Image (cartoon, rainbow, N blue to C red):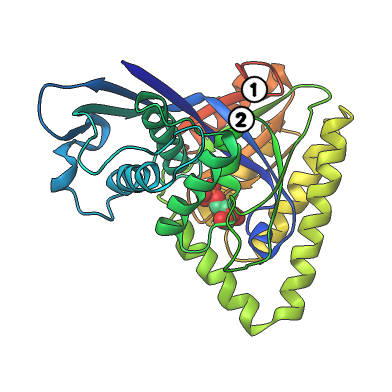
Amino acid sequence: MTVSSAPGKIILFGEHAVVYGRPALAVPVTQVHADVEILASDRPGIWIAAPDIALHSDLNSLPSDHPIAAVIHNFLFLSRTSFSPAGRGAEEEGSFPNLSIKITSTIPVASGLGSGAAVTVALVRALSSHLDYPMSDEEVNAFAYEIEKLHHGTPSGIDNTVVTYGKPVYFVKSPPSPARGGAGGEVETFTVGTPFTIVIGDTGLPAPTRDSVGDVRKLWEAEKERWEGVFDEIGEIAKQARNAIERGRTKELGGLMNQNHVLLQEMTVSSPELDRLVETARTAGALGAKLSGGGRGGNMIALVEPEKADSVASSLMNAGAKRVIVTAVGRRSNAP
Ligand code: PMV
């Protein structure tokens, strides 16, 4: 049996502006994860069970653009067609063993916690290991970026990157180029000077990233100069935040989060539900708060002193959050 796991993620700073080439910071959230188990099977074919989404099917019965089918087809295609001196990819058409694949995930879907990227990364790593087709982190990341593109149109690449590396990342998207492969951008992992605590509050509203990204694009197309200025301000906040995190000046992050949230509101990607949770967290003693990810629904995040985490979390629940997660960024297991 082969097993593989990939964490969830949150964007700390820079969402949306990252699509326009400004830097963004994201961190893994290990309290939630996608897990894949692969077993050799007696039954002919590749059988997939994903009980969380009531999926029990063989690969050939799924539409080829189904997110899970797309990962498996693309992996099989890649491993059959590429050939390296190490002998990778020498499999012939039809020679794959019969497989039983089980996929589970505790990452809420469509809420900005990277569930799609985590399933892709866990699944491709499990396939790569089970079928003896080794892939580096860079290759896994590039693969996951291609799958993200199938589902989100023009993703920056930050989700697949943080989920693949499982470390805090400072990410700058590469300019578009048809010739460019890779995982979408320049990636720097960075160190956390002093661990800090984040409370994540879920509005429970689904938040299709494609819609909010599309709406921001319309704003930008109508008034490029104005929005380029806003993206610059957000990029500056992300740079200052990285600096503060590396130097352990955690308290500065609260104000930077608040500033980033105002700019996201201006971009129309907040919502009354997100604003209510952000305000609730601040009133309950958070050092700062903002929405995280595509916006409109999904999650918000609040920076808190560790001793305030529980009271901020319960205030968020009382204000209507569907779920809260407390995570310590920079601690080895990021346990709360
Ligand atoms: O909603 P999420 O967490 O998948 O994040 C989307 C982040 C955006 O910057 C809005 C889009 C992107 O591709 O980076």
Please state if 213 lies on the left or on the right of 255 as rendered: left
| Contact, mark 1 vs mark 2 (Cβ under 8 Å) | yes
- Can you say which quadrant of the picture contains the N terminus? top left
- 257, 83: nearer the viewer: 83
Quadrant of residue 232 within the rendered picture: bottom right
Residue receiving disc 1: 309
Q: Residue furthest left?
A: 43
**Against 65, is 55 above or below?**
above
- Can you say which quadrant of the picture contains the C terminus? top right
Q: Residue at x 48, y 46 (%)?
A: 143
State whether residue 25 appears in this view. yes
- 91, 130: nearer the viewer: 91
Q: Which mark is residue 16?
A: none
- Label 2 CB, ligand 1: below 8 Å? no
Instruction: Say which amino acid is labelled 1.
Output: Ala
- 62, 127: nearer the viewer: 127
Please state if 75 lies on the left or on the right of 248 as rendered: left
Q: Residue at x 30, y 47 (%)?
A: 73
Q: Earlier in the sequence, mark 1 or mark 2?
A: 2
| Mark 1 and mark 2: Cα distance apart in space | 7 Å
Disc 1 packing (10 Å; few <14; some 14–19; many ≥20)? many
Residue receiving disc 2: 199
Instruction: Say which amino acid is labelled 2.
Output: Val
Please state the horizontal and vertical placement of residue 268, each as a whole percent of the image. 59, 65
- The total of numbered circles placed on residues is 2
